[in-house]
Image: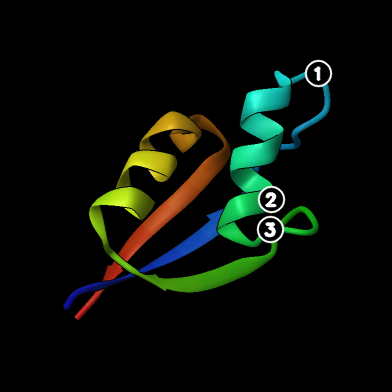
């Protein structure tokens, strides 16, 4: 299964509650935090909803 390295590069201030909860569900606690997750359909859907706040890199 492929993995994704995701980094939050934009603030969640003035974003909708739904976007804030999505970032929290992905595991982000602060700005510029980087996490690695398995690329399941559920994770990919969450990333797609907040991709304007993230920097995404595929890990092989």
In what element is the residue under mark 2?
helix
Q: Residue under label 3, please give it.
A: 28
The answer for how far apart the CA atoms under marks 2 and 3 are is 5 Å
Q: Position of residue 30 (x, y in %)?
A: 80, 57
The answer for how far apart the CA atoms under marks 1 and 3 are is 16 Å
Give the image quarter of residue 45.
Answer: top left
Q: Position of residue 33 (x, y in %)?
A: 69, 64
**14 lies left or right of 19:** right
Q: Earlier in the sequence, mark 1 or mark 3?
A: 1
Determine the residue positioned at 47% across, 50% down: 55
Q: Residues within 10 Å of mark 2 (few under 14, many from 20)?
A: few
In the displayed structure, 39 sits above or below 2; it is: above
Q: Report the disc number at residue 14.
A: 1
Colour scheme used in the picture? rainbow
Determine the residue positioned at 39% across, 54% down: 56
Give the image quarter of residue 12.
Answer: top right
Q: Residues within 10 Å of mark 1 (few under 14, many from 20)?
A: few
Q: Residue under label 2, please give it.
A: 24
Q: Position of residue 27 (x, y in %)?
A: 64, 62
Quadrant housing the N terminus: bottom left
Determine the residue positioned at 26% across, 61% down: 40
Give the image quarter of residue 19.
Answer: top right
Asked if the residue at tag 3 contacts the one at tag 1, i.e. Cβ–Cβ closer than 8 Å, the answer is no
Determine the residue positioned at 42% across, 71% down: 37
Asked if the residue at tag 3 contacts the one at tag 2, i.e. Cβ–Cβ closer than 8 Å, the answer is yes
In what element is the residue under mark 3?
loop
Q: Earlier in the sequence, mark 1 or mark 2?
A: 1
In what element is the residue under mark 1?
loop
């Amino acid at each position: 299964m492929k993995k994704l390295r995701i980094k939050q590069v934009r603030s969640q201030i003035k974003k909708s509650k739904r976007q804030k909860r999505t970032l929290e569900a992905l595991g982000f606690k602060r700005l510029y935090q980087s996490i690695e997750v398995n690329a399941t359909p559920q994770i990919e859907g969450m990333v797609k909803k907040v991709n304007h706040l993230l920097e995404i890199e595929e890990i092989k």
